[in-house]
Image (spheres, grey):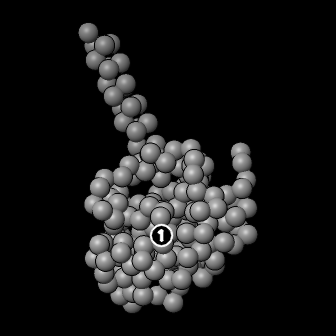
Amino acid sequence: MKTKIILISLLIISLGVFAQGKKKSFYSFEVKTIDGKKFDLSSLKGKKVLVVNTASKCGLTPQYKELEELYKMYGGSKFTIIGFPANNFMSQEPGSNEEIKSFCEKNYGVTFQMMEKISVKGDDIHPLYKWLTSKNENGIMDANVQWNFQKFMIDENGNLIDMVPPKESPMSDKIINWIKTTK
C-alpha cells in the first residue's frame, strides 16, 4: 500500500512539473472578433499568421491598404492576417469595435480578420500580447510594441518567428520572403 501511495505521489508531482514546463504557443489563446465572437487561435494551425496592432487615426493607418493587398495575394490555407485595434498610442484608436469595423471596410476594403479592440502594452496588456512581447512567455524574444502597426510573424506551428517594426511596410521583402518560404 505504501509503495502505491509513493508511486501515485511521484506521478502527480511529475505531471505537475511537466505541465509547468510546457511553453505556451500562439494556439494557447482565445480572443474575440471585432463582432464579439470567440475565436480560438488554434483554428489557425498550419497557417503562417501576421499579427498586427492597428489604429484608425495614425500616420501609419494607410498600411491597412497594404495589409489588404498582402492578404489578397497570399491569404488562404497557408497564410492569414489578424488585426488587433488598440488605443495605446496617443489615443489614435478611439472608436468602438463597430466604428472601427466600418472604418476599415469603408476606407480600405479590409477583408482579413479584425479582432476586438485590446491593449497591447501596459498594466492592462492582453494575454496574447504579453506572450508576443515577452521572451519569458514566447521563448524567442522581447519585442515591446513600439507603435501602431507593429507586425508579429507566427509560423505554422504557433511559434513566434520574428517582429517587423511599425514603419516597415507589410509588403516588405522580409514579410514576403517569410510567407513564400516553405518548410
Residue 142, quarter of the rendered image: bottom right
Horizontal and vertical percent position of residue 20:
40, 43
Q: Looking at this view, is 5 or 109 the one in front?
A: 109
Which quarter of the image is occupied by the N terminus?
top left
Horizontal and vertical percent position of residue 120:
40, 72
* Labels in figure, total: 1
- Give me the residue at 67% from left, 57% from top: 179
Residue receiving disc 1: 110
- Give me the residue at 52% from left, 61% from top: 81
Horizontal and vertical percent position of residue 60:
53, 85
How dense is the environment of label 1, judged by Cα within 10 Å: few (below 14), some, or many (20 and up)? many
Residue 169, quarter of the rendered image: bottom right
- Give me the residue at 66% from left, 72% from top: 171
Residue 100, quarter of the rendered image: bottom left
Identified by mark 1, the residue type is Val
Q: Looking at this view, is 110 or 118 the one in front?
A: 110
Q: Looking at this view, is 161 or 39 the one in front?
A: 39
Residue 34 seen in render: yes
